[in-house]
Image: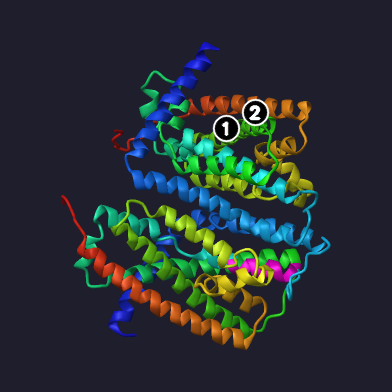
Amino acid sequence: MSGVTAKYFHVARVSMRARTAYLADFLLGSVFYALILYVFVQLWSVLGRTRGFAVEGFGPRELVWYLMASEAIMLGRARFEQETDEEVKTGAIAYYLNKPYRYVLFKLASYWGETALKMALNIAIGATVALLAVGPIRVNAAHLLAALACAAMALTLNFLISMALSLSAFWVEDTAPFFWIYGKLLFVLGGLFAPMEVYPDALARVARATPLNYVLYAPARLFVQFDMDFFMSALMMQAVWIAALSLLVMALYSMGVKRLNVNGG
Amino acid sequence: MGGAAWEAGFVWEHFKFNLASAMEYKWSFVSQVVFMVLNDFLLLFFWWLIFGKVQDIGGWTFADVIAMHAVLAAAYGLSVSVFGNVNRLARIIAEGQLDYYLLLPRNPLLHALVSRSDISGLGDAAFGLAALCLFTPVTWGRLALFIAVSVAACTVYTCFAVITGSIAFFIGNAQTISLQLLGALITFGGYPDSIFKGLVRAVLYSVVPVGFVVYLPVSLLRNFSAARFSGLLAFTVAMVWAARCLFAVGLRRYESGNLVSAKI
């Protein structure tokens, strides 16, 4: 491992250890995830018995496992945006400028340290709840690895979108409302609760044109219904969006730090 | 009665002051309210998808589900915008921040709750009213009933938050458990009660009173009954009594903190 990689790997490790310092608190944080899964097990089982409710390729069991995967990502994302917003607004970001690392990469490493831990816990809890509630689905090890690779790209994509929104704090007073809307757009266009197969065609086309469905829908669908063509196209689109958003984040950061004013010590 | 009017005036003055303070930051104020309304409307998207495929879910129509979200948002929004510290009470107690309120000649519980406003709650309340008027059949009578049940639901939510926050008097750091219980109330409150059965359903009308914050108010909006409305009011009064009593009992166990903080 090169010195540069080792440095950021160490940052990720510190972030992971910081999350486990208060273990009970960390574990209790997953109660909400289990609760959501429970509610949807009930909802999908009632809808499964309702006439007229059919989703191509998805029965109640697949819908529960789809939600297990999409919610694991949604709730597994480390939430760094408020911290970044504060650092920009208070000028604390200035203290990162003379450190031997790049601010955005430092944040990415820290994000991944926490996210990897939360994802592992969510997958364990989600799989247990789904297994107990609806039983297993058919999935082999190769497909599982492919879905995990897609999930890793999805979480990196989420980081870049969140970072771009956080850096807007250089220009606006409060970025929190952007994150409410981002969360809801993930819900609507990302396919948080239901796969695109439930959507009307026109809306599904709009959703597929955005990066949001590559954050949740693509990895969750691959987990439940693996398809090699879909996997390759999803991975390629994720790479394209990651490249485009990386450029945007770099541009926002370099423009933003030029506007930085720090008062006092 | 004079005491209640006096306290209502105190709450109103604090709310006006908090509102004026938030309006100093215009972008922040406008964006919090407007984006919260938008945020809440997007919540209805999932149900629009589902009701595009089915007529009802265990007897709940799309209009009922919209009424459910309207009541939940209005109750929560009113609570956090007027009693802005409602979700932070456990932390205030655990960190010894009650000291400030105990030194002043006002009801410390009420004072602690109203000394902050979460302005995004106004967006929730506005969404509740707008969603009801836009997507469900509305008359003046139904509108008045919506306001009445929302105020009752807001009171039940606030009292439940005080009860969960007061756990901190007894076990110390209760912020996580308090937030989990409040989160459970909000989560369950976003889905029709017809999907829950047995013990869970019983819990939703007792330990976590979602039934009185959402389901009973919605059933009144669907089909008004004086008996059920009286039941909601009686439960609301019982919750106010329970919250005040638990806080008062807990306060006797309160230990002052040594955290140095400035309140401006």
Q: Which residue carries the number 1 mark?
A: B159
Residue B249, visible in the rendered structure: yes
Rendered view: A229 above or below A99:
below
Q: Residue B161: which quarter of the image?
A: top right
Q: Residue B71: which quarter of the image?
A: top right
In this view of the protein, which residue sits in the foreground, A58 or B125? B125
Amino acid type shown at disc 1: Cys
| In the image: residue A134, left or right of residue A153 | right
Query: Which residue is located at x 49 percent, y 36 percent?
Result: B86
**How much space separates mark 1 and mark 2, taking CA atoms?**
9 Å
Q: Which residue carries the number 2 mark?
A: B236
In this view of the protein, which residue sits in the foreground, B156 or A122? B156
Residue A67 on the magenta span: yes
Q: Magenta stretch?
A: A60-70
The reply to whether the C-beta atoms of the residues labelled 1 and 2 are less than 8 Å apart is yes
Q: Position of residue A143 (x, y in %)?
A: 62, 84
